[in-house]
Amino acid sequence: MDTNALLNEITQHLEEGGVVPYLGPGVLDLVPGGCPVPKSPEELVKRMVAKSSVPFKIRGNMTATAQYIENFKHRKTLVGIMEEAFAPSVPPTPLHQHLARIVRKPLLIVDAWYDNAMETALQARNLWGQVQGVSQSEHFGTWVHYFRPNGMQADPFEADTWDTLLYKPMGSISPAKNFLVSDTDFVEVLTEIDIQTPIPDIVQQLRSGRHFLFLGCRFRNQLERTFARQVMKRSSDKHWAVLPGELTKNEARFLEEQNIARIDMPLDVFVQLLGVEEASEAMALAV
């Protein structure tokens, strides 16, 4: 399939509500003027080691570094570092704004990073809410919390009335500073994720039969691959991922296993080809 045909297919599915956008930290590369928060695990771990002494051999590993800080400095210290790193509000990019304007209901958006850009973009909608993964270290026995647009915690049944659901499987700075970031956080989730226990029922319902579009994601390590695999479980049998540059062997194998078609181009180029920039400018002029 040529590029134009592929873009037309993705655009049609997006407008019809047949696509679940799955956003990774690389989406923040699109923030105009530079992003005020870490936009990759590598950047985040640098923030961590700048705030707390960590053994040299684990300084390049985000989850291991977080675990060391949690073990030797206390969980509150780790949460404090995360709060400081993601405290600046991230302005939504045209991509975030474009996704927030999709009118097909119900819409599911997955955002696997800790910033608030997608949440901010969704404030323009009426009926929406978010569900976030929470740490067992802080909320033992509970996998997720639900939140209304005003930040108040919601009951799970309310999600059935929302026309858009933002799913933040790793937590978020907003509204309640929930973070899955340490080895222990993820071991608890990964122990149960194969039987889908940590995946909210509403997410399992909304993903059924839909395609996934991975934007700003990499699949280099087991954690990234496992989260993507389990979140998209029992969905459609056809997906896409914008993945520029050279793939690792694990990434190539993962794409083949999950029937994810690779789009080998920079994310900003893909967004422009989708017409997102033009649509955002037209909307701004109309307002």
Image (spheres, rainbow, N blue to C red):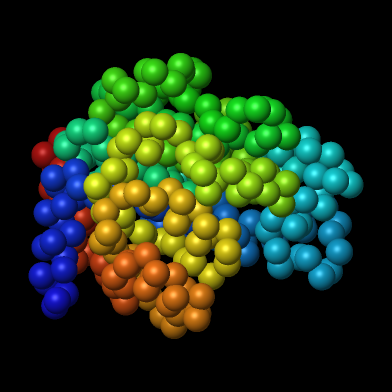
Q: Is residue 149 above or below residue 255?
A: above
Residue in front for this viewpoint, 92 or 170: 170
Q: In terms of depth relative to the viewer, which is nearer, 5 or 187?
A: 187
Question: How many numbered circles does the render carry?
Answer: 0
- Left or right of 243: which side holds 126? left
Image: 134 above or below 34? above
Place of residue 16 in the rendered image (x, y in percent of width and height, measured from the top left): 13, 45
- Check the image and name the residue furthest to the front: 195
Residue pictured at 73% horizontal, 34% vertical: 137
Q: Position of residue 14 (x, y in %)?
A: 19, 50
Looking at the rendered image, the quarter that the N terminus falls into is bottom left
Kindly tell me whether residue 199 is visible in this rendering.
yes
Which residue is depicted at the point 46% across and 16% down? 155
Q: Quadrant of the C terminus?
A: top left
Query: Is residue 121 in sight in this rendering?
Result: no
Would you say 242 lies left or right of 167 here? left
Percent position of residue 242, x then y: 33, 67
Q: Residue at x 51, y 44 (%)?
A: 195
- Who's the residue at 25% across and 48% down the image? 210
Asked if 83 appears above or below 41 in the picture, the reply is: above
Residue 249 is left or right of residue 4, and the answer is: right
Where residue 41 appears, as percent x and y from the top left, is 60, 60
Based on the displayed image, in which of its 4 quarters is residue 59 positioned? Answer: bottom right
The answer to which of 146 and 150 lies nearer the viewer is: 146
Residue at the right extreme, as displayed: 72
Q: Is residue 29 above or below residue 124?
A: below
